[in-house]
Image: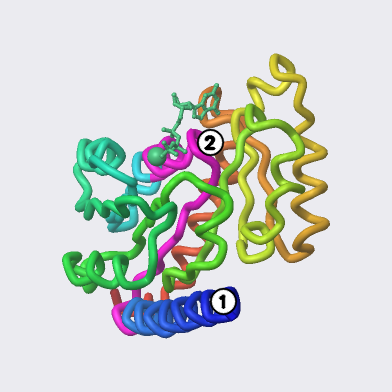
């Protein structure tokens, strides 16, 4: 009996989150902004990939929402790039949720933006269930987590549009096979785009920028801006 009610509470929570996520998505569409949620393993390179993208995609007006359990180290990294940043602390929670992101969106000048990066808390489990309302979901893992990391976390790959397998420069040192990781990701989600790259050496980074340019062009009201 006790277990059943816990499940029900969890379902209510997820349903409430889905409704708020839908509200965030509608707001973004109305304002003509594309939000890119970047989730993934702790330390896999999420912030680095966002920093590089901000440096590369100068033609777009970019802001960031930076989720961290405590402190605002990632937010400070993004702020140093001269973009508008909203830090979000989740406290004991291992993921952002649509309610928090909704408040962050209120603090951004949406009409003046093209792209918003939303860096989720480093984790491959919790963010899978909590939609934020971002139109694009990216999941980042790196070879240093071991090449079975993708197969072990199917949920988050099933709900993403892009998987980045980062740190391929380290693959031979840690004995990981990035091809296997890419195969696992494609098996879990045949629609998924999968990139193998190194944010450190720059190998194949152009494909990351290419993906972002394509999604930025999907802006709902891009004409006349
Ligand atoms: N060798 C190597 N190191 C990388 C690469 N990409 C990122 N790093 C390093 O990995 C570390 C973690 O990078 P971050 O970008 O902070 O990772 P993150 O996913 O944002 O980390 P959290 O937000 O703490 O979960 C840093 O020291 C980066 O310089 C890569 O392609 N190769
Ligand atoms: Mg980070």
Q: Which residues are magenta?
A: 30-53
Which residue is identified by label 1? 7
Could you tell whether 175 is left or right of 224 in the image? right
Instruction: Please state, as top left, top right, bottom left or bottom right, where the C terminus lies in the image.
Output: bottom left
Q: What number is the disc on residue 196? A: none
5 is higher (above) or lower (below) than 108: below
Mark 1 Cβ and ligand 1 under 8 Å apart: no
Of labels 2 and 1, the one closer to you: 1
Picture residue at 64% right of the left edge, 32% below the top? 145
**Mark 2: few, some, or many residues within 10 Å (few <14, many ≥20)?**
many
Element under disc 2? loop
**Residue 202 in picture, x, y percent from top left:** 54, 28
Which residue is identified by label 2? 44
Residue sticking out furthest to the top: 173
- Evaluate if marks 2 and 1 touch, with contact meaning CB atoms under 8 Å apart: no
**Residue 200 in picture, x, y percent from top left:** 51, 24
Q: Tell whether position 38 is magenta.
A: yes
Quarter location, residue 161: bottom right
Q: CA distance from mark 2 to mark 1?
A: 32 Å
């Amino acid at each position: 009996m006790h277990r059943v009610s816990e499940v029900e509470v969890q379902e209510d929570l997820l349903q409430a989150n889905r409704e708020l996520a839908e509200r965030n998505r509608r707001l973004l569409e109305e304002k003509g902004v594309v939000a890119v949620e970047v989730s993934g393993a702790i330390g896999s390179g999420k912030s680095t990939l966002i920093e590089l993208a901000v440096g590369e995609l100068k033609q777009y007006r970019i802001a960031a929402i930076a989720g961290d359990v405590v402190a605002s180290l990632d937010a400070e990294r993004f702020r140093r790039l001269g973009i508008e940043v909203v830090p979000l602390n989740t406290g004991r929670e291992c993921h952002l949720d649509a309610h928090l992101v909704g408040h962050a969106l209120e603090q951004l000048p949406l009409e003046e933006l093209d792209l918003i990066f939303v860096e989720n808390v480093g984790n491959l489990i919790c963010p899978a269930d909590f939609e934020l309302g971002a139109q694009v979901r990216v999941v980042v893992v790196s070879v240093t987590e071991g090449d079975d990391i993708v197969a072990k976390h199917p949920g988050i790959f099933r709900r993403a549009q892009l998987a980045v397998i980062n740190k391929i420069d380290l693959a031979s040192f840690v004995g990981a096979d990035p091809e296997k990781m890419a195969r696992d990701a494609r098996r879990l989600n045949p629609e998924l785009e999968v990139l193998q790259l190194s944010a450190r050496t720059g190998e194949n980074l152009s494909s990351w920028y290419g993906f972002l340019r394509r999604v930025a062009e999907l802006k709902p009201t891009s004409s006349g801006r």
